[in-house]
Amino acid sequence: MLVRRTFLLSAVAMSTGVIAPALRAGRAYGHAQDYATFVAGVRDDAIRQGLDTGIANRALDLSTPNAQVLRLDRTQPEFHLTWAQYRQRVITPRKIADGRTAVAVQRALLDQALTRYNVAPGAIAGIWGLESAYGTRMGTFGVIDALCTLAYDGRRAKFFHDELMKALHILGMGDIAPEQMIGSYAGAMGQPQFMPSAYLRYAVDMDGDGRRDIWHSTADVFGSIASYLSHSGWIGDEPWGQQVTVPDTLAQAALGRTHTRTLQEWMDAGVRQIDGSAFPRADMRGAILRPDGVGGESFMVYRNFNAIRRYNPSDFYALAVGLLGNEIT
């Protein structure tokens, strides 16, 4: 087990957003200092704030910015997909089959997360599937390498510098070794793809081994996703949403997440469950999404839909999480 150490970040810097001298000197394109000097400044700042020197040296043994991180950051493709195209892309037969197998193996841990946090297994498993293909695709970048590159690069220097210092904080706590802290090119970590700030707020040690290991411990992964959703307002024993039928005559302007009505009011407007039947709880409030407009699929979404959106603020993402979770659990 890694030795747990205390790493105290400066309260003033964390609360005011003060940027360390190393960042100020290197935050713009055409940097005022070279990368080695910038990294040395980060190392010195972290050690002054309590990080073990040995861990700092291992984590920040970096000589040049990561060219692949910069390439991916600067050339992010813009996709303008319809909902139908997005659904077809992310909820594939392979994703469903793999998810059913993974859930069958891990059912006991999903039930444990449900018991502890009262969050539906489908929501946990849906996020697990979309974020890392059930733990099989966490990214291959060293998180400190990626965040250090992006903090130096300058496009969103302050944001990535803050995340870098939080990632170093996590290393100082002993939850993961520097060499094992891997994730996406943007620093999203482990199977749930938490940024370091989200990790510090929501990650939990559900397997009880003294570490919050969202890379290797499936129990900690499920517990951490459930913790995130619970803190985001998940309400136990309520659905996230469901597919419905909506009359084409219902104006698109009357729909959307913020236009909530009771299900009785929606039924009075001609809305029904997908099989044409009435809703069983007429007093419950919901909103209708019809992402592709008239002729496309329609969904009634409830309060838990908004909890999923706090994980990723996209209607498409939240719908995909809910639908994938329904399919695999």
Image (cartoon, rainbow, N blue to C red):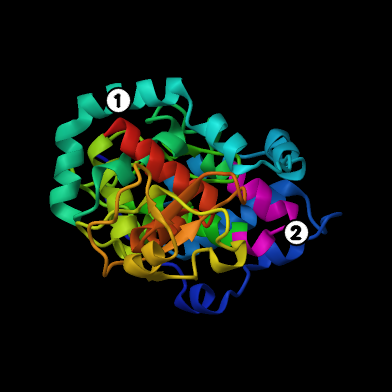
**Label 2, on which residue?**
26
How many discs appear?
Answer: 2
Foreground: 300 or 50? 300
Q: Is residue 259 shown left or right of residue 36?
A: left
> If the image is split into quadrants, where does the C terminus sit?
top left
Front tag of 2 and 1: 1
The residue lying at 70 percent from left, 41 percent from top is: 79
Q: Which residue is painted at 21% across and 59% down in the image?
A: 236
The magenta span reads 146-159
- Left or right of residue 189: residue 303: left
Q: Of helix, strand and loop, which one carries label 1? A: helix
Amino acid type at mark 1: Arg
Position of 197 compared to 327: left or right?
right
Q: Which sits in the foreground, 274 or 317?
A: 274
Of labels 2 and 1, earlier in sequence is 2
Relative height, residue 297 to residue 136 (above, below): below
Above or below 108: residue 115 = below
Task: Look at the image and say whether residue 151 sits in the magenta stretch.
Answer: yes
Q: Quadrant of the N terminus?
A: top left
In the displayed structure, 246 sits above or below 21; it is above
Q: CA–CA distance between discs 2 and 1?
A: 47 Å
Left or right of 265 in this view: 254: right
Residue located 60% across and 61% down the image: 252
* Residue neighbourhood size for the residue with mark 2, other residues' Cα within 10 Å, grouped as few (<14), some (14–19), many (≥20): many
Residue 168 shows in the view:
no
State the predominant SS element of the stretch in magenta. Answer: helix
Give the number of the disc on residue 100: 1
Along the line of sight, the residue nearer the viewer: 289 or 103: 289
Q: Position of residue 274 (x, y in %)?
A: 38, 44
Estimate the x, y position of residue 10 in percent, counting from the top left: 47, 72
Element marked by disc 2: helix
Amino acid type, label 2 = Gly
